[in-house]
Image: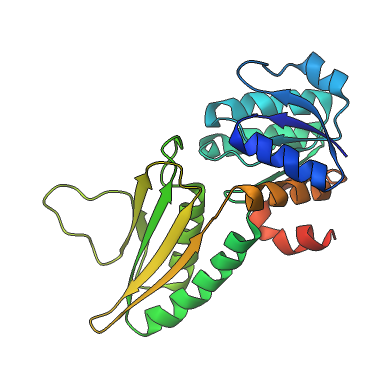
C-alpha cells in the first residue's frame, strides 16, 4: 500500500515506522515545511492518506484527498466542529474516510470496559469522574478519548446527564454533572482514568499509553481497511472489523 502522510511530527514518524514494518510504503510527507497540494498528492500516486496534522488543517486536507479521490484516515483530534462539512465532502467524492479519537486497540477495549463498569457502579450508587493527561504540546482539551470515555460513562450511568470541563469559582459540582479534568505537562503520551467514588471505597480504571506505537499501528490497520471502501466511519465503532480485515 502506498501511503501519504499529513503531518510529519512524532506521530508521523511513528506511522512511517509502523507502515514499513507492516510492508507498506510512505510516498509523501506533508507538513509546515512541505505543504500539501493537489499536484503533489496526485504525483505521489498514494492509495490512502493518513492525517495526524493540526485541527485547523483537517478540512483543507479532506478537500485535497477528495479532489484526488484518495481515501483518508483522520487521527487528528479537535476538528469535530467541522464534522458535518467533512462528511459532505467525503460523500460527494465517493471515497472512504475513517476517523477516531484514539487508534489504540487497548483504548477501544478500555471504552467497552468503562461502559460495563458504569452501569454496574451506577446501580450501586457510585459517583464518577474522568481525568486525562497528555504532553504539553497537545492543543485540544479535553482529549478526544476523554470525550469518548464520557459518552461511555453517560451511557451506563442514569445519575449523570452531562459533562463539564471546569467549575465556576465558588460553586460545587451538580450531582448530574460528570467532570473531565485535563493535565498538560512534559512528554506524557496519554493517560486516561475513570474514577468511581462511594462513601466506603474508590475504584479507578486507568489506561496508560507507554508510547505512540500503538496509535500508529491502529492507524495503519485502519488505512488497510478503508482503502477499498466508500463512506464515513468512526474507528471505535468498527474496530473489530478493522482488526480482522472484514
Q: How is the image coloured?
A: rainbow
* x, y percent for residue 57: 59, 26
Q: In the rendered view, would you say 185 is above or below 111?
A: above
* Image coordinates for residue 84, horizontal then vertical, percent: 60, 38
Residue depicted at 50% across the width and 65% down the height = 152
Dividing the image into 4 quarters, which one contains the N terminus? top right
Identify whether 206 is placed above or below 87.
Answer: below
Residue 88 point in image, percent of width and height = 69, 35
Name the image quarter holding residue 90. top right
Depth check, front residue: 213 or 220:
213
Quarter of the image where the C terminus is located: bottom right
**Residue appearing at x 75%, y 46% in the figure:** 220
Instruction: Please tell me which residue lies in front, 119 or 141.
Output: 141
70 vs 88, left or right, is right
* As drawn, 147 above or below 43: below
Residue drawn at the location 44% of the way across and 74% of the way down: 118
Q: Is residue 70 above or below residue 212?
A: above
What x and y, as percent, mark residue 134?
44, 46
Which residue corresponds to the image point at 57% horizontal and 48% vertical from the top-left?
101
Is 227 positioned to the left or the right of 133 in the image?
Answer: right
Instruction: Left or right? Give the position of 116 relative to 201.
Output: right
Specify the farthest residue to the left: 170
Q: Total of numbered circles in the picture?
A: 0
Quadrant assignment, res 11: top right
> Is any part of residue 40 visible from this angle?
yes
Q: Is residue 233 visible?
A: no
Amino acid at each position: 500500500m502506498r501511503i501519504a502522510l499529513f503531518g510529519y511530527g512524532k506521530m508521523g514518524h511513528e506511522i512511517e515506522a509502523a507502515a514499513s514494518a507492516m510492508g507498506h510504503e510512505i510516498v509523501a510527507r506533508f507538513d509546515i515545511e512541505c505543504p500539501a497540494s493537489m499536484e503533489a498528492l496526485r504525483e505521489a500516486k498514494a492509495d490512502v492518506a493518513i492525517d495526524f496534522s493540526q485541527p485547523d488543517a483537517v478540512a483543507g486536507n479532506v478537500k485535497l484527498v477528495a479532489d484526488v479521490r484518495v481515501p483518508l484516515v483522520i487521527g487528528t483530534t479537535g476538528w469535530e466542529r467541522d464534522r458535518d462539512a467533512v462528511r459532505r465532502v467525503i460523500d460527494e467524492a465517493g471515497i472512504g474516510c475513517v476517523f477516531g479519537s484514539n487508534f489504540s486497540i487497548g483504548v477501544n477495549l478500555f471504552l467497552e470496559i468503562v461502559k460495563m463498569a458504569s452501569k454496574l457502579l451506577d446501580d450501586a450508587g457510585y459517583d464518577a469522574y474522568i481525568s486525562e493527561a497528555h504532553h504539553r504540546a497537545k492543543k485540544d482539551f479535553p482529549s478526544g478519548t476523554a470525550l469518548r470515555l464520557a459518552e461511555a460513562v453517560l451511557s451506563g450511568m442514569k445519575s449523570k446527564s452531562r459533562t463539564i470541563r471546569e467549575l465556576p469559582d465558588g460553586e460545587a459540582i451538580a450531582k448530574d454533572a460528570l467532570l473531565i479534568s485535563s493535565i498538560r505537562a512534559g512528554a506524557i503520551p496519554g493517560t486516561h482514568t475513570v474514577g468511581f467514588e462511594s462513601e466506603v471505597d474508590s475504584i479507578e480504571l486507568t489506561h496508560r499509553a507507554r508510547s505512540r506505537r500503538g496509535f500508529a499501528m491502529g492507524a495503519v490497520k485502519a488505512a488497510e481497511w478503508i482503502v477499498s471502501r466508500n463512506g464515513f466511519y468512526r474507528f471505535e465503532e468498527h474496530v473489530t472489523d478493522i482488526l480482522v480485515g472484514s
